[in-house]
């Protein structure tokens, strides 16, 4: 394919038409700075092929702000000897016209022709995208996408393969892919992508499970039904047998038998009770008879006893009477002894009284003497006391007042001394005989005087001298002196004395009297604590008592006369008396006892005698003999009756015991229960029969076994259908696998020529390297020396270079298959260093021998050595303008 | 019936094993329903036959019903189907419809579905048909399984002078039938002699079978499975007088015939013969084919074609080809126009057919061949 001419109008910045004429078969280098419109040109070529002319997704073609624009693109190219020219306009004027060797096509027909030629497809709606671009997507490299080869190859996929089919020398398969699609479709009806059942297949699987469950349930219900039928059979036969045999009646009959038997036993028991009562009665009677007989038999013995008793009583009396004289003597002796002891006690008491009186007199005499002495002393102390009291009375003075006077005197003295010191001192020494008169006092000889007051000295003969003591203190001293003197005088007056000395003297007398008074009082108190008068009374009383005692003693001495034998002490005498007294009372008690015993013995003899006589008289009568005889006979009769009764009772007891009334009771209960149970069981059977019949009627109407048979058939049917589908699914799965496998094998056969072309270019760039093409015709493993990896692991620059190489290899392959191979490179290889770029230039130049290449760049200087004439876009634009 | 001379010649119809209530839902719904209907039709036919043959009675030797728990409708329909023959019917409970405490029979009575002329032999005994001078000694099964010979006491059952002694029983005659070891419901083979019977009418074996000149299995009147040949008949028994040898005629009742073929295809003519045989079968056939051996693609097409014809003609056709190998010939493959890798695929599948799991490979091959063929035909058209 050779693009000859390109013209665009109203596309983006190209508002006015611009044309690229005379495009060369090999490389065409178109350059211009950024935003000069290179990309717009590329976009225009793409739009011309890829976009539907009716598309609404080509707004980007519109010149900015020109709503009336109708972007138009004209293309002319030659392919396979045919001349194609395309005119396409969008938006405001949607048209597509294609001429192939003069034959015209338009609209979608024209578009489809182009798509078929180049191997791409149109989108169903919206703008054309990468995945629609097919083979051009691989060969037309947009700015900056040269390295992304995988997606481009993938999108080119089918177009590529069908384009390459005739390369492998044989037909890949006419419609093999259709078969695969058809098989895939059929398989998809049965299986999901992951091989799980779906649709009818899945439905059947579920249906089978459902049927199996239903069958199991039906089976279970039939089993139940049959069990109920069996139960019915058993019940019916049991019920009928019971109705025939009526076992409860037998039980009831036997119960009645037992009841009758028990009644018999009960009558025996009643008899037994009666007999026992009789026996008890007889025994009681017999006991009484025995008692009577014993009583009678005891009378004879009693008479003998009484005789013996009488003898014994007499003997006792004689014995007692014999003891009487001895006992009397003992009493007499004891009494004599006692009288003697009493006398001695009297003597002892007299003696003791005397002795006590004597002692009393001695004590009273002593006491009297003491009292007298105390009385004398007391009188003396009383006298002293009176004296002291009188002295005290006479010298009564206030001690405090004396003290105050004394203090005043001392102050006065002190004041006087001070006044002497400050007083005017007047000394004199007169000629003998001469005198002076001072203040009317005559002075003679020599002397000295201190003057405090204004004084007048009369010198006889001379006149008078006035002396005036000076100093201001003098007046106050003088006043103080006067005041103190006055105070002292007042105090002394109060005290009633003339001088202080007298007061002092008086006070001393007073204090002495006070002390003596206290002393005398204490003495008096020591001899007469209760007063003198009381002491006098006591003394008097003591004397009187003494006199009385003396008289008493004298009287006693007169009475006793001989007062000088010494009897034992009173206590001893008394003790001796008591001993004798107790001996006396013992003897007297013994004699009383004895008298009583004698009396008793005598009474006993009388009583025994009387009783013996009574009984002897009674026994001599014949009546009692007869009674005894009768009694013996009655006893014998009762004893016989008793033995009869015992025998009867024993036989009754045996009979009752043999009949086992307890067991009979149990039998009755047992038979009653048996009858009830059996009858109840029969009723239960009847009820169950009714229930089972009703149940079976209901279940029977459902036709369970018929249903089961039907469901089993359905299951079999479903199973068969399932098996069919299962086998079909397996077969389809297998078929699809084998088909895919074989198809892949074919693809692998396409790898070889692609690899050849790839190697051709690669050796220019990396002489030692290999780049393997995988089964999807994708460049895969890259190796260079020891370096090994995939293409994606290479640097960006290397990847771009590899991408371009791969694309050129595809182009070679496509060319061999007779397909159009226009190559468009928009600013490619910008990341290649100079050396690599050099290599790439060689490769491009080589490729350009086989393919037309449009190379757009903004770096024309880099491509100077490409050997083609660069075309300046700016220049083209200016041409257009011109 | 009466002889030409006007004397009574007892004649009766002997049938058994109706198995009513059996369903055939493993077949397609429509086919199953038709097979069920055919069984009712068979009863009607029996009644009709009894009328035509001037039979004095119809004896049904057990298994009138296939199960105890059948639907009320089935019960009513069975008795309704007998209506044409107004003479006495004697129905004997068999092992499928034993006279249990609650059974299909007690239900039938409760439903009031049993006409007056039908005697249910629910208890062992003698049913006297005075008018027909027939004494029928019955041995009904009253339990699901019986291991004793219920006809043992036939010899002790007395019948009036001049009456035919006819035994009616259901079970396996010992030592005569295949697979009867340990079989339940045993019957002594010489029961006729032991019990001085004129005839012993038996049920249980589904094909018509003579045990001796007085002992017969009538078989089921309408076949219901592929086994048991000689099913689908009823016996008309005529015994001129007590002690006379019975005159027995067999009458076909069956509507559908059941065929099960096991064929091996080895040479092309085998397929031809199979197709011919299929073509010869009457429309009232239920066919079950299982094939093994090998078949060419062309043969497969012919087989498919023949089967699709048969499906339209017959009541039911089933063909199991699981063991049949598909072996395309050179011509076969050439005719498929399988170019490119499709050819490789066919080769691979053929190879796999000889491997461990030939089934899927063969099916896959058949699918592929079918698809290619139809494509070619589409192209040609």
Image: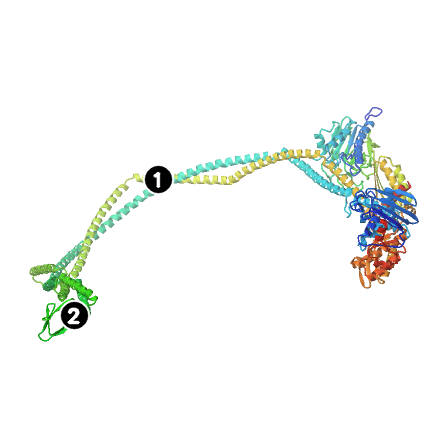
> Total of numbered circles in the picture?
2
**Near-viewer residue (A737 or A548):** A737
Q: Quadrant of residue B118?
A: top right
**Relative to B192, is A571 above or below?**
below
User: Percent from the top left, x then y, of residue A390?
Assistant: 10, 62
Disc nearer the start of the sequence (2/1) = 2
- Where disc 2 sits, the SS reads strand
**Relative to A101, is A342 above or below?**
below
The coloring applied to the image is rainbow
**Near-viewer residue (A2 or A387):** A2
Chain to which mark 2 belongs:
A
**Near-viewer residue (B346 or A48):** A48
Residue at 46 percent of width and 36 percent of height: A271
Residue A631, numbered circle? 1
**Relative to A751, is A377 above or below?**
below
User: Percent from the top left, x then y, of residue A720?
Assistant: 79, 42
Chain to which mark 1 belongs:
A
**Relative to B26, is A398 above or below?**
below
């Amino acid at each position: 394919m050779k693009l000859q001419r390109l013209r665009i109008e109203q596309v983006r910045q190209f508002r006015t038409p611009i044309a690229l004429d005379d495009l060369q078969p090999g490389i065409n280098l178109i350059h211009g700075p950024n935003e000069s419109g290179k990309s717009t040109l590329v976009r225009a070529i793409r739009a011309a092929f890829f976009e539907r002319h009716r598309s609404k997704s080509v707004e980007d073609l519109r010149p900015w702000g020109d709503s009336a624009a109708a972007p138009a693109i004209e293309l002319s190219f030659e392919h396979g000897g045919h001349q194609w020219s395309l005119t396409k306009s969008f938006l405001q004027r949607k048209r597509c016209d294609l001429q192939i060797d003069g034959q015209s096509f338009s609209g979608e027909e024209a578009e489809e022709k182009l798509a078929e030629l180049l191997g791409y497809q149109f989108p169903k709606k919206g703008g054309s995208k990468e995945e629609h671009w097919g083979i051009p997507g691989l060969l037309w490299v947009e700015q900056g996408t040269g390295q992304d080869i995988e997606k481009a190859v993938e999108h080119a996929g089918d177009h590529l393969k069908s384009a390459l089919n005739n390369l492998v020398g044989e037909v890949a398969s006419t419609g093999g892919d259709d078969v695969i699609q058809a098989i895939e479709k059929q398989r998809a009806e049965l299986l999901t992508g992951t091989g799980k059942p779906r649709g009818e297949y899945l439905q059947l699987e579920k249906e089978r499970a459902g049927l199996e469950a239903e069958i199991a349930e039906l089976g279970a219900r039939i089993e139940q039904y049959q069990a109920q039928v069996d139960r019915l059979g058993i019940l019916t036969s049991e019920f009928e047998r019971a109705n025939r045999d009526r076992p409860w009646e037998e039980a009831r009959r036997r119960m009645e038998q037992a009841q009758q038997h028990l009644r018999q036993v009960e009558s025996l028991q009643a008899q037994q009770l009666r007999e026992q009562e009789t026996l008890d009665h007889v025994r009681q009677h017999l006991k009484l008879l025995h008692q009577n007989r014993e009583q009678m038999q005891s009378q004879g013995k009693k008479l003998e006893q009484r005789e013996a008793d009488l003898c014994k009583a007499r003997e006792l009396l004689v014995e007692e009477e014999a003891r009487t004289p001895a006992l009397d003597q003992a009493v007499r002796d004891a009494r004599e002894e006692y009288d003697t002891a009493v006398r001695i006690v009297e003597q002892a008491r007299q003696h003791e009284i005397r002795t006590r009186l004597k002692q009393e007199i001695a004590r009273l005499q002593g006491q009297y003497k003491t009292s007298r002495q105390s009385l004398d002393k007391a009188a003396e102390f009383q006298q002293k006391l009176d004296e002291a009291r009188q002295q005290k009375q006479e010298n009564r003075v206030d001690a405090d007042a004396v003290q105050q006077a004394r203090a005043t005197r001392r102050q006065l003295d002190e004041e006087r001394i001070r006044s002497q010191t400050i007083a005017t001192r007047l000394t004199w020494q007169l000629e003998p005989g001469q005198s002076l008169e001072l203040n009317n006092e005559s002075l003679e000889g020599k002397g000295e005087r201190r003057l405090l007051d204004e004084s007048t000295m009369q010198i006889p003969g001379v006149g008078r001298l006035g002396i005036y003591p000076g100093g201001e203190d003098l007046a106050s001293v003088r006043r103080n002196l006067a005041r103190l003197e006055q105070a002292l005088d007042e105090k002394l007056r109060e005290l009633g004395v003339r001088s202080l000395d007298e007061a002092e003297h008086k006070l001393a007398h007073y204090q002495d009297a006070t002390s003596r008074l206290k002393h005398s009082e204490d003495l008096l108190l020591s001899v007469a604590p209760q007063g003198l008068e009381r002491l006098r009374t006591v003394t008097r009383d003591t004397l009187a008592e003494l006199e009385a005692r003396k008289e008493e003693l004298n009287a006693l001495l007169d009475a006793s006369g001989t007062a000088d034998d010494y009897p034992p002490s009173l206590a001893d005498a008394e003790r001796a008396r008591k001993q004798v007294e107790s001996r006396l009372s013992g003897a007297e008690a013994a004699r009383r006892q004895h008298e009583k015993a004698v009396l008793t013995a005598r009474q006993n003899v009388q009583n025994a005698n009387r009783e013996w006589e009574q009984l002897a008289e009674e026994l001599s009568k014949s009546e009692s003999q007869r009674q005894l005889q009768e009694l013996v006979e009655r006893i014998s009769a009762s004893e016989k009756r008793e033995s009869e009764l015992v025998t009867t009772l024993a036989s009754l007891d045996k009979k009752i015991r043999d009949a086992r009334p307890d067991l009979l009771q149990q039998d009755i209960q047992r038979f009653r229960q048996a009858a009830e149970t059996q009858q109840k069981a029969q009723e239960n059977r009847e009820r169950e029969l009714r229930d089972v019949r009703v149940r079976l009627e209901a279940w029977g109407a459902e036709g369970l076994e018929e249903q089961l048979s039907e469901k089993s058939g359905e299951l079999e049917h479903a199973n068969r259908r399932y098996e069919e589908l299962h086998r079909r699914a397996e077969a389809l799965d297998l078929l699809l696998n084998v088909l895919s496998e074989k198809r892949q094998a074919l693809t692998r056969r396409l790898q070889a020529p692609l690899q050849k072309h790839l190697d051709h270019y690669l050796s220019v760039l990396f002489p030692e390297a290999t780049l393997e093409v995988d089964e999807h015709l994708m460049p895969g493993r890259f190796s260079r020396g020891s370096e090994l990896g995939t293409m994606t692991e290479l640097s960006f620059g290397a990847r771009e270079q590899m991408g371009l190489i791969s694309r050129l290899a595809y182009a070679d392959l496509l060319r061999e298959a007779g397909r159009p191979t226009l190559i468009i490179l928009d600013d490619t290889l910008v990341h290649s260093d100079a050396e690599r770029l050099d290599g790439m230039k060689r490769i491009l130049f080589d490729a350009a021998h086989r393919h037309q290449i449009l190379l757009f760049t903004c770096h024309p200087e880099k491509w100077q050595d490409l050997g083609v004439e660069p075309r300046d876009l700016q220049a083209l634009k200016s041409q257009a303008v011109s | 019936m009466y002889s030409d001379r006007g004397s009574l010649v007892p004649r009766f119809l002997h049938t058994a094993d109706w198995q009513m209530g059996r369903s055939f839902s493993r077949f397609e719904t429509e086919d199953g329903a038709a097979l069920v209907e055919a069984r009712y039709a068979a009863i009607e036919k029996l009644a009709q036959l009894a009328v035509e043959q001037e039979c004095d009675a119809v004896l049904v030797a057990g298994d009138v019903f296939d199960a105890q728990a059948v639907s009320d409708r089935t019960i009513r329909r069975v008795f309704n189907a007998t209506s044409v023959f107004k003479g006495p019917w004697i129905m004997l409970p068999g092992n499928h419809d034993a006279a249990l405490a609650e059974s299909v029979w007690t239900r039938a009575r409760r439903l009031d579905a049993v006409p007056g002329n039908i005697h249910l032999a629910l208890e062992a005994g003698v049913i006297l048909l005075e008018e027909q001078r027939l004494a029928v000694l019955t041995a009904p099964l009253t339990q699901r399984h019986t291991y004793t010979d219920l006809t043992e006491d036939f010899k002790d059952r007395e019948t009036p002078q001049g009456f035919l002694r006819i035994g009616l029983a259901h079970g396996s005659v010992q030592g005569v039938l295949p697979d009867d070891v340990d079989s339940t419901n045993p019957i002594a083979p010489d029961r006729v002699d032991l019990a001085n019977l004129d005839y012993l009418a038996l049920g249980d074996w589904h094909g018509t079978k003579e045990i001796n000149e007085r002992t017969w299995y009538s078989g089921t009147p309408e076949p219901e499975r592929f086994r048991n040949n000689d099913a689908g008949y009823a016996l008309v028994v005529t015994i001129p007088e007590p002690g006379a040898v019975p005159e027995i005629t067999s009458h076909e009742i069956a509507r559908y015939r059941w065929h099960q073929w096991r064929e091996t295809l080895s040479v092309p003519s085998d397929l031809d013969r199979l197709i011919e045989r299929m073509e010869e079968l009457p429309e009232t056939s239920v066919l079950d084919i299982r094939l093994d051996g090998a078949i060419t693609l062309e043969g497969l097409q012919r087989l498919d074609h023949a089967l699709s014809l048969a499906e339209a003609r017959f009541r039911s056709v089933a063909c199991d080809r699981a063991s049949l190998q598909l072996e395309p010939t050179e011509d076969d493959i050439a005719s498929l126009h399988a170019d490119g890798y499709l050819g490789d695929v066919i080769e691979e599948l053929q190879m796999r057919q000889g491997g461990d799991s030939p089934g899927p490979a063969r099916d896959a091959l058949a699918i592929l061949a079918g698809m290619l063929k139809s494509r070619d035909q589409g192209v040609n058209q």
